């Protein structure tokens, strides 16, 4: 009688440990997404600004020092959580040397788990027109696109509904 109880206890402990490990791995994947923030030149970023896929992409240019950008980050993240089929990329215009001391702590404090990269292209006049000739350079600036449709937003979204409505207008085949 003791042997079956011992076997049951062992199996129960193993299953519980496996579930706890899987849950921990899932949580750490989301929480640790920005442990390694890549620094891109504009030439490295440029291919990410187009797609021949029907998948929807949302690329947002922002910085920690931009109050409207910071206010908008939770809206972008909430949209991403509701729409896991949309690929969100946050392009930080902060200084690469601030990644460890300022950017990572900022993202952690704000609970931002969307993918972040840093754009190291100090001469903005050389690349802003390549993204959109109508862009003044003000941030936040968001691009929503797929292979067939593209829209640019030189403003902060007010809330998730505002963002959803704009994306629905842009991506007509959704």
Image (cartoon, rainbow, N blue to C red):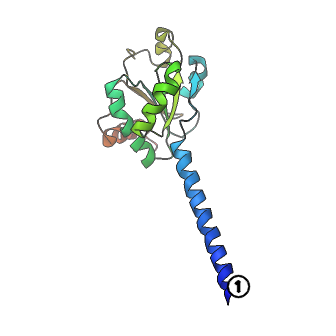
Q: Residue at x 29, y 35 (%)?
A: 158
* Viewer-proximal residue among 5 and 98: 5
The vertical placement of 152 against 12, above or below, is above
**Which residue is at the far right?**
3
Q: Which of the two residues, 151 or 6, is positioned nearer the viewer here?
A: 6
Residue, disc 1: 3
Height in image: 85 above or below 131?
below
x and y percentages locating residue 42 in the rendered image: 56, 18
Q: Circle 1 — which element?
A: helix
Horizontal arrangement in the rendering, residue 36 relative to residue 81 (left or right): right
Quadrant in which the C terminus appears: top left
- Residue 123 screen position, x and y as percent: 49, 9
Residue 1 placed where, x, y %? Answer: 67, 90
Q: Nearer the viewer, residue 156 or 143?
A: 156
Graded by Cα atoms within 10 Å as few (under 14), some (14 to 19) or many (20 or more), the crowding at tag 1 reads few
- Residue 132 image offset from top left, x and y in percent: 45, 18
Callout count = 1
Please tell me which residue is depicted at 44% across the width and 47% down the height of the picture: 81
Residue at far bottom of view? 1
């Amino acid at each position: 009688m003791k042997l079956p109880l011992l076997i049951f206890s062992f199996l129960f402990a193993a299953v519980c440990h496996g579930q706890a490990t899987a849950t921990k791995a899932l949580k750490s994947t989301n929480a640790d997404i920005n442990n390694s923030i890549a620094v891109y030149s504009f030439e490295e970023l440029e291919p990410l600004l187009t797609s021949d896929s029907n998948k929807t992409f949302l690329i947002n240019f922002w910085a920690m020092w931009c109050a409207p950008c910071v206010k908008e980050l939770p809206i972008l993240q909430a949209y991403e959580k509701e729409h896991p089929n949309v690929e969100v990329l946050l392009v930080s215009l902060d200084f690469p040397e601030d990644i460890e001391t300022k950017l990572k702590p900022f993202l952690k404090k704000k609970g931002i788990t969307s993918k972040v990269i840093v754009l190291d292209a100090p001469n903005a006049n050389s690349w802003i027109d390549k993204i959109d000739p109508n862009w003044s350079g003000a941030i936040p600036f968001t691009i929503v696109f797929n292979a067939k449709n593209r829209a640019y937003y030189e403003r902060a979204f007010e809330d998730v509904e505002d963002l959803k409505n704009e994306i629905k207008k842009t991506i007509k085949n959704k």
